[in-house]
Image (cartoon, helix red, strand yellow):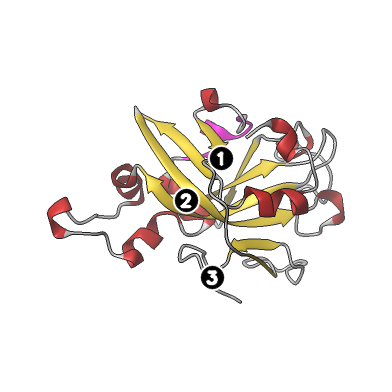
Amino acid sequence: MPRFFFDRDPRLVAPELLGKVLLRRWRGKLLAGRIVELEAYLGAEDPAAHSAAGQTARNAVLFGPPGHAYVYFIYGNHWCLNVSCMKTGDAGCLLFRALEPLAGLPEMARMRGIELPSAAAGDVPHRTLRMLTTGPGRLCQALAITRPRDNGKDLTKPSSGLWMADDGFVPSSIRTTSRIGITKAAEQPLRYVIAGNPFVSKQSF
């Protein structure tokens, strides 16, 4: 995905980013998941955004060029991945909330501590697949995303080892809902999902 794609208001980027693919090159393996759920955060005007209080050492990536990874720690045990949007100096971003796993499932499962059935056992149950990358903390664990390793990485370049691509998929329907898992400004319709996709974290519509 080119940098100019992210050089816009996250409310414009989000519906177009749904359906694209997030890829991770990890120890010689390619891991991939389709982006099915995002939340927009709008910078200084958004009380729920990390950038609401201004630029700090922790959130500096959000104020830098668009298309970079902002990774933070939450609840004492989960990493969350965001991509910076808007021009340098403005701090909009999108939080990745869920992926539909596409490639590298055995590696994802291993990093999530989940046992997948053998090939002889047939298809992996849907409930098991949901445990891989449904939810911001799970998807980061499945793709080995951490702040020390990935904060500030250029998500527009495959050479970074963590990037996004367009494989031509176009969602048939996109819905917006209020944001979830936060208390400030949660009522704003800034959560974007592929309607009907079973890997969306919460079917609240």
Who's the residue at 53% across and 49% down the image? 169
Q: Is residue 164 left or right of residue 70?
A: left
Q: Secondary structure at mark 1?
A: loop
Q: Within the image, what quadrant is residue 106 found in?
A: top left
Is residue 111 found left or right of 159 in the rendered image? left
Question: In the rendered structure, which segment of residues is drawn in magenta?
Answer: 145-153
The span from disc 1 to disc 3 (Cα, nearest Å) is: 25 Å
**Residue behind mark 3:** 202
Q: Is residue 56 left or right of residue 161?
A: right
Mark closest to the chain's N terminus, 2 or 1: 2
**Residue 8 lies in the magenta stretch:** no
> Going from the N terminus, do you reach mark 2 or mark 3 first?
2
The image quarter in which residue 66 lies: top right
Q: Is residue 175 left or right of residue 4?
A: left
Tell me how far mark 2 sits from mark 3, CA to CA: 15 Å
Q: Which residue is mark 2?
A: 139
Q: 10 Å neighbourhood of mark 2: few (<14), some, or many (≥20)? A: many
What is the crowding at mark 3: few (fewer than 14 residues within 10 Å), some, or many (at least 20)? some
The answer to whether residue 57 shows anywhere in this view is no
Q: Can you identify the residue that label 1 sits on? A: 166
117 or 81, nearer to the observer: 117
Looking at the rendered structure, the secondary structure element under dot 3 is loop
Picture layout, residue 20 above or below residue 127 = above
What is the x, y in percent for residue 123? 24, 59
Amino acid type indicated by mark 3: Lys
Amino acid of disc 2 = Leu
Q: Residue at x 60, y 33 (%)?
A: 155
Task: Look at label 1 and name its amino acid.
Answer: Asp
Sequence-wise, which precedes: disc 1 or disc 3?
1
Residue depicted at x 62% and y 31%: 156
> In this rendering, is residue 84 above or below 35?
above
Look at 72% across and 48% down and name the residue there: 13
